[in-house]
Amino acid sequence: MSRVAPALLAAALVVPGVAGALPWNDDMKDQVSVKTQETTVELPAESVPSDGGELDGPADLAELVRARLKAGEELSNPLAAEDADDVRAAEMYDIYCRVCHGVAGAGDGSVGLKYNPQPMDLTLPYVQQQTDGQLYYTITHGGVIMPSYRFAMSQDDRWRIVQYLRTGLLEEAAKVAAAEAESGGETAAE
Ligand code: HEC
């Protein structure tokens, strides 16, 4: 009997080890659940976020460009040109865009300079030739890394900024260019 007890003890220690290697032992672990270190599960198509808001913008660049072009065809600025409020729009631009796109839209805002890719120069034909709807889409949903502003600003304010990009901002850019030409002129005269 005294020889059986150690054998039993040894068996008791070994058996769970063996059982650990049995295939069904992982059943509890292999479930349809998010595992440790696993990234968040993607939302199924057409899901509505728990806060009830719109879903975030497109997943990749191709989709973003398609959605922007589509918005360009479908959306038109509900504000008439005479409803433009450049003072209000400039205020909104200063709050939401200037840090990245700079005071005159050149893409040289203090925060923007730290970005890669850098913020777009908003005075370029690439931007200026876009339709109002495309620009509105970008402000609403953001860009590749540019944030979205649909929760920050009312729709009217977003449309006002679209108008401002074509008016007040270009005036700012002209002022900067004139000042540069002047200082450039002085330097050349020296
Ligand atoms: C945090 C920095 C940041 C802010 C703030 C920001 N942008 Fe941008 N923006 C970018 C960057 C970076 C790009 C270029 C890459 C991209 O598409 O994200 C860009 C691109 C753009 C484009 C060109 C999109 C295209 O067609 O390729 C427009 C138009 C634009 N921004 C307008 C605005 C306006 C208007 C605001 C204010 C409501 C604003 N941005 C605020 C960073 C910013």
Image: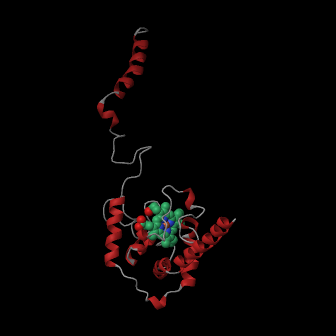
| Image spot of residue 181 (x, y percent) | 60, 71
The quadrant where residue 125 appears: bottom left
Relative to 111, is 75 on the left or the right?
left
The quadrant of the rendering that contains the C terminus is bottom right
Residue drawn at x 59%, y 72% is 176
Relative to 168, is 143 on the left or the right?
left
Q: Does 3 appear above or below 53?
A: above
Residue at the far right: name it. Answer: 190
Residue drawn at x 33%, y 62% is 63
The quadrant of the rendering that contains the N terminus is top left
| Image spot of residue 62 (x, y percent) | 33, 60
Callout count: 0
For the residue pair 51 and 3, the one nearer the viewer reads as 51
For the residue pair 170 and 40, the one nearer the viewer reads as 170
For the residue pair 184 and 139, the one nearer the viewer reads as 184
- Colour logic: secondary structure
Residue at the far bottom: name it. Answer: 82
The quadrant where residue 46 appears: bottom left
The quadrant where residue 182 appears: bottom right
Residue drawn at x 30%, y 34% is 24
Q: Does 7 appear above or below 126?
A: above
Can residue 50 be seen here?
no
Can residue 113 be seen here?
yes
For the residue pair 187 and 59, the one nearer the viewer reads as 187
| Image spot of residue 101 (x, y percent) | 54, 67
